[in-house]
Amino acid sequence: MRSTFFTKHAVAAALAALTAGAAQAEDVEVLHWWTSGGEAAALNVLKEDLESQGIGWTDMPVAGGGGEQAMTVLRARVTAGNAPTAVQGLGFDIIDWAKQGSLANLNDVAASEGWNDVIPAALQQFAKVGGEWVSAPVNVHSTNWVWANKAVLDDNDIEIPASWEDFVAALDKLKEAGVTPIAHGGQAWQEATVFDGVSMSVLGLDGYKSAFIDLNEDVLGGDAMKEAFDRMAVIRANVDDNFSGRDWNLATAMVINGEAGFQMMGDWAKGEFLNAGKVPGEDFVCFRFPGTSDQVTFNADQFMMFDQGGEVSAEQAALASAILSPSFQSAFNVVKGSVPARTDVSDEAFDACGKKGMADLAAAAASGNLVGSMAHGHANPAGIKNAIYDVVTAHFNGEYDSETAVMELVDAVSIAK
Ligand code: GAL
């Protein structure tokens, strides 16, 4: 990894030179998968922030929630010797790229701006490799959320379910009323996202950690895991016939327009509700997946700055600095549905779900109930994550019963290890 010479003053001087036109402003090319309405609105906050500093933006969107397609395109670009300037990345993928020596070193920006003191430790695990800062955290999402259409709940006399049994009773009521109980998009990463909350609700925090972080075979193949798969089968029985292949934001739209009651999805779903002009508490409600109200399965988006064959560039340093500025952290995350990646940002500008997200994150971090999302690459590296995806998806699509699924899970993980 290369060291950099950019101190706070150097960054400021470079920016001043760029805005004054004394130096040729280079664009930053940003590879990301934020292509839904809500995501694009959030990305605009970042584009505009940079443009106001005289830094141009070359957009490299690769559609596909969860980012698998984006990572495939990234690998091809890096192999061709043509890495983008900045790339959205998650969890263990960031660590992998850093270990391959592909990332520019952000230590000087981090040091001059005090990142060590304000970025939560859970995020630093993935933003620092071997003590060097290699990426700039943008947000903290979490996956164990449920989104519901408030009018649909009210019309059917449904209270926010506090337990799995209440949830199942609510699903039954909706089915009876001819409303699709659960909006779901049949893609492996979405099934895995649902599985984050469902497995946490059965395994508890320790069981979730043993299974997905420690890869303990007894837990992966145990009775509680079988119960988690049984619950996935109940969820499968409550989605509509056209779920296969549907994008996550189209599933969110089904809840927004009252076609479906619930969606289990990370809080990027909130960005879609907001983008449609909906208000939490009035039009929609957010709650933690029943049985996980004290836990947070987190998924933090970060931007990795790819080494362009020298020191970190002025534009890369400016982008990293802009991403971590407290005002940007508030403005961006209000729109995105996530919460700030700094502990010192006020929740004032956030809506009720955002305030809850911030409070839940702080409480979970303090009590040790904060754990990386398996579905979004914060529990284990891509090879293991994909092995788990395959089993969860095959079970969801009826290829395995729950008993077979746990056996397959043990095998798939042991082969991928
Ligand atoms: C996640 C990402 C979120 C959101 C989601 C759907 O992996 O962390 O920011 O964009 O995919 O695209």
Image (cartoon, helix red, strand yellow):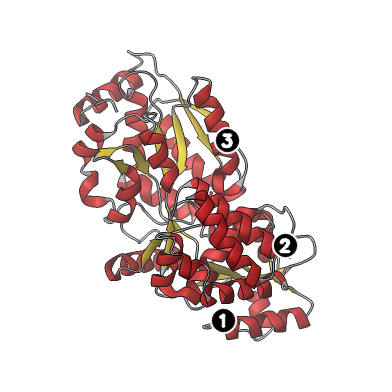
Q: CA distance from mark 1 to mark 2?
A: 22 Å
SS at mark 1 in the image: helix
Q: Is residue 375 visible?
A: no
SS at mark 3 in the image: helix
Q: Answer with mark 3 or mark 2, whichever residue precedes in sequence.
A: 3
Q: CA distance from mark 3 to mark 2?
A: 25 Å
Look at mark 3 in the image and give the residue it sits on.
72
Q: Answer with mark 1 or mark 2, whichever residue precedes in sequence.
A: 1
Q: Answer with mark 1 or mark 3, whichever residue precedes in sequence.
A: 3
- Residue at left 50%, top 61%? 143
Look at mark 1 in the image and give the residue it sits on.
164
In percent of width and height, residue 203 lies at 47, 74
In percent of width and height, residue 214 lies at 40, 60
Which of label 1 and label 2 is nearer to you? 2
Q: Is residue 155 above or below residue 302?
A: below
Q: Amino acid at mark 2?
A: Asn
Q: Amino acid at mark 1?
A: Trp
Q: Nearer the viewer, residue 43 or 416?
A: 416
Q: Nearer the viewer, residue 146 or 374?
A: 374
Q: CA distance from mark 1 to mark 3?
A: 37 Å
Residue 199, labelled with which disc?
A: none
Look at mark 2 in the image and give the residue it sits on.
397
Q: Amino acid at mark 3?
A: Thr
